[in-house]
Image (tube, grey):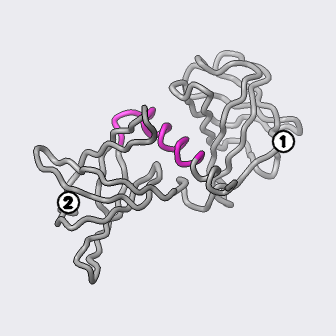
Amino acid sequence: MRELIEKDQRITIIPADFKSANKGVVTEVTPDGFTLELDYDSDGILRNNYCEFYTDTKHGTLYFESYAKEINDKTLKIASPARHKFLQRRRYTRVKYIYDLNLLSGKKKYKITTLDISAGGMKFKTSENIDIEGRYTIELPLNETMNVKCYYCPIRIERGDDGLYTHSGRFEYDTNHDKMTLIQYCTKRSLEIKNK
């Protein structure tokens, strides 16, 4: 674990109830795990209950599951995980995501077909001329009961020979919870696809 986790590294921890997601800084690394100093109270993180961990490294986004052996206020002693994965070199895992959705700007509605998403943004096609300077509201269905609402900000627009526009842009969020939900969704979808 020492070659993957370093002192002062930032790590995101997501327990089973991801409303209690948190971030922290590694303060010590030992052969049997590491110590994590959380940004917020450790409410919702239970001793010996598995959580998901994400951190950016020079090799890409590192993902693993482990548990807190000890919890003392905001200080957690995390057990060394048995396995880990590098998800990809992008900051956020990107997955195929095909939906016909609406992009909203005030009362104006644009019909789009999404191609892929990550917690950082999305790519889609549309026949409509959407202003690259705009900021648009979008609701992303993740399953039958869960949606994430966020804002789409265009970065790049290309017009194809078929007359359709391909957009790429980034997401902005009202809450960190929505971002964490999308990170978790994309990671799980990526692992499901790889394991097929």
Q: Main secondary structure of the magenta part?
A: helix
Disc 2 residue type (three-letter): Glu
Q: Secondary structure at mark 2?
A: loop
Residue beneath label 1, please? 82
Q: Is residue 16 left or right of residue 148?
A: right
Between residue 87 and residue 23, name the one nearer to us. 87
Residue 190 spot, x, y in % from top left: 59, 53
In the image as oriented, which residue stretches furthest toward the bottom? 161
**Residue at image location 36% in from the left, 50% down from the top:** 171
Crowding near the residue tagged with mark 2, few <14, some 14–19, many ≥20 C-alpha atoms within 10 Å: few
Q: Quadrant of residue 68?
A: top right
Q: Which mark is residue 133?
A: 2
Left or right of 22? Residue 140 is left
Gap in angstroms between the C-alphas marked 2 and 1: 47 Å
Residue range highlighted in magenta? 173-188
Q: From the viewer's perspective, is 11 left or right of 118?
A: right
**Residue 27: image x %, image y %?**
72, 34
Is 35 rendered above or below residue 132?
A: above
Residue at 43% over, 36% down:
144
